[in-house]
Amino acid sequence: MRGGGRNSRNLERLGLLVVCALLTGCSGEHSVLDPAGPQARHIGGLFWMFVGIGSAVYAVVAGFLLIGVFRRRRHQIDTGAPTTRPDHDSERGLRVFVISGVGVTVAILFVLIIADFVVGQRTSSLHAEEALTIRVTGHQWWWEIEYDHPIPGKIVTTANEIHIPTGQPVRFELQAQDVIHSLWIPNLGGKKDLVPGHPTSVWYMATEPSTFVGLCAEFCGRQHARMRLTVVAEPEDRFRSWLANQLQPALPPDSPDLRRGRDVFLTGSCALCHRISGTPANGHIGPDLTHLASRPTLAAGSVPNTRGFLAAWILDPHEIKPGVRMPPNQIGSQDLHALLDYLQSLN
Ligand code: CUA
């Protein structure tokens, strides 16, 4: 008896844990079920509608199944024989019941199809005449982000981090450099593929200031899973000041150590692939590093942007992200520290 009580308590705890895990999975910076924009809200509503109707159908079917099992068993107990040939009346009743079941199923499927269609229409109807345009280019395995501007010198380029103002639709122009990628910011809306040679666009809008995680949702090679991006939705004035800061070129180094760090960057192989605005480094193969220190992560969300990880990344990026395009670098200890100081000064 005591063992049975303990078992049931353990089962209760396990059930509680499962419920908690399921509920915590519904919220957060990377969840379709924690919508922060109108499109995600429509998609979330559709999800709950499917879950609700699906659960009700499941409960009804399971209920009828149980009724069938118990009725059959009672019949056997009463008559001592299994039912092999139902009488005419019950057969007719069964036929009506099955036909009604098929009718209800078809009706439910129609309701779900129409709801799906309406949500598709609503999510794709987001639009504005005058809108901020952000160009997103998928690379193996990082995101290049450009804030469009009619004057080329005022185009802001960054990587793996998108800032958007809240309360207004933003147009995302999507393109891919190498293979097919897919942009997915679950808290804001659905996925959209980035196909090489076929530029496309998608609109998103955030209603709440918050930080979300976006990711690549199309298998694009070995490091597909490490192709994340940070999305910061903030009030218009904060967004404008962030954008104005991103437009500024890197400040000239103001100490011998920082100057040494910059020289290591410019004379080594870094400048062949990376750009730092305000310096001769103008590579376009890897991410723009003009404001590297302002970003929360390195290598498209693979590791936090700390001095230790930055050093590890520079020396052997394949240790963190095997297969990445960036080669390992052999840099002496003093040069490395100067380089780290310089890169960490790029705010
Ligand atoms: Cu890019 Cu998966």
Image (cartoon, grey):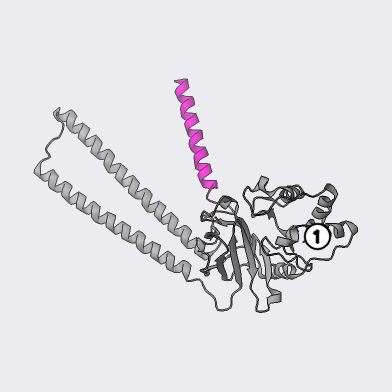
Q: Which residue is mark 1?
A: 267
Find residue 270 and report its image quarter: bottom right
Residue 276 or residue 120, whichever sits in front: 276
Image point 17% across, 33% down: which residue? 75
Q: Is mark 1 within 8 Å of ligand 1?
A: no
30, above or below 174, in the image = above
Where's residue 17, x and y in %?
Answer: 52, 38
Residue 340 or residue 50, whichever sits in front: 340
278, above or below 344, in the image = below
Residue 209 or residue 174, whichever sits in front: 174
Where's residue 326, x and y in %?
Answer: 67, 54
**Span of residues in magenta:** 1-26
User: What amino acid is found at the position of numbered circle 1 in the picture?
Assistant: Thr
Task: Please say whether residue 267 is visible from this viewpoint.
Answer: yes
Ligand number 1: quarter of image: bottom right
Q: Can residue 321 be found in the magenta stretch?
A: no
Where's residue 107, x and y in %?
Answer: 29, 59
Q: Quadrant of the C terminus?
A: bottom right
Image point 45% across, 68% down: which residue? 122
Dominant SS of magenta comes to: helix
Where's residue 276, x and y in %?
Answer: 75, 64
View extreme (left): residue? 88
Dot 1 lies on which element?
Answer: helix
111, above or below 19, in the image = below
18, above or below 282, in the image = above
Q: Quadrant of the N terminus?
A: top left
| CA neighbours of label 1 inside 10 A, class few (<14), some (14 to 19), many (20+) | few
Image point 66% across, 53% down: which residue? 299
Q: Can residue 25 be found in the magenta stretch?
A: yes
